[in-house]
Image: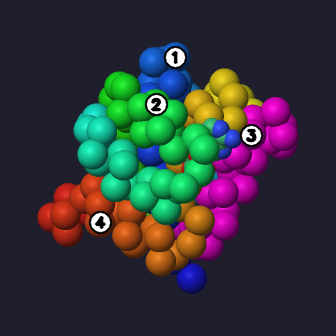
Amino acid sequence: TTNRTFTMIKPDAVENGHIGGILEKITSAGFKIVAMKYTQLSTRDAQEFYAVHNERPFYGELVEFMSRGPIVAAILEKDNAVDDFRALIGATNPAEAAEGTIRKLFASNIAENAVHGSDSDENAAIEGAFHFSGREIY
Ligand code: CMP
């Protein structure tokens, strides 16, 4: 059934000029963009978005990275959106990501890994609502 996932093109990929390349991979794979914005997370936004990771040793580094520059946030629609998008982006660590995946093509390292993808339907809804109001989804 058709459902939604949430993604961010992270600051490293924006800095490296990969917005266009990543959006091309996403739309070519059959995802429909139903919401999208160019924005920047504040420190507090990043702390809140990644609160689930706040006990991890990399939490501080993650918050600093994700708030250091602009991102592209988007809600994507497709059959089996969450799982298919995670397959398209590849493993968290780009060194382990499959050939042709977005992280293999565009990511620098395990911390600066170019894109976010929701890990469940429930989190996709929470993360989408963090960035978009109902009136911004088409
Ligand atoms: P993502 O899986 O989208 O969400 C959690 C993020 O934490 C992950 O992408 C990376 O950006 C970051 N992350 C995961 N593991 C590490 C690590 N070992 N060191 C630094 N950052 C990490």
Mark 1 or mark 2: name the one nearer the start of the chain: 1
Q: Is residue 120 visible to the viewer in this orientation of the structure? A: yes
Task: Assign a secondary structure to mark 4.
Answer: helix
Q: How far apart are marks 4 and 3 (CA)?
A: 27 Å
Q: Which mark is residue 65?
A: 2
User: Mark 3 vs ligand 1: CB under 8 Å?
Assistant: yes
Q: In which quarter of the image is the C terminus?
A: bottom left
Residue 93 part of the magenta-drawn span: yes
Q: Where is residue 92 in the image (x, y as percent from the top left)?
A: 70, 45
Callout 3: few (<14), some (14-19), or many (20+) C-alpha neighbours within 10 Å?
some
Callout 4: few (<14), some (14-19), or many (20+) C-alpha neighbours within 10 Å?
some
> Closer to the observer: label 2 or label 3?
2
Callout 2: few (<14), some (14-19), or many (20+) C-alpha neighbours within 10 Å?
some
Residue in the picture at 36% in, 49% down:
47
Task: Assign a secondary structure to mark 3.
Answer: loop
Q: Distance between the residues labelled 1 and 2?
A: 14 Å
Task: Assign a secondary structure to mark 1.
Answer: loop
Mark 4 or mark 1: name the one nearer the start of the chain: 1
- The residue at which mark 1 appears reads as 16
Q: In which quarter of the image is the N terminus?
A: bottom right
- The residue at which mark 3 appears reads as 93
Mark 4 or mark 3: name the one nearer the start of the chain: 3
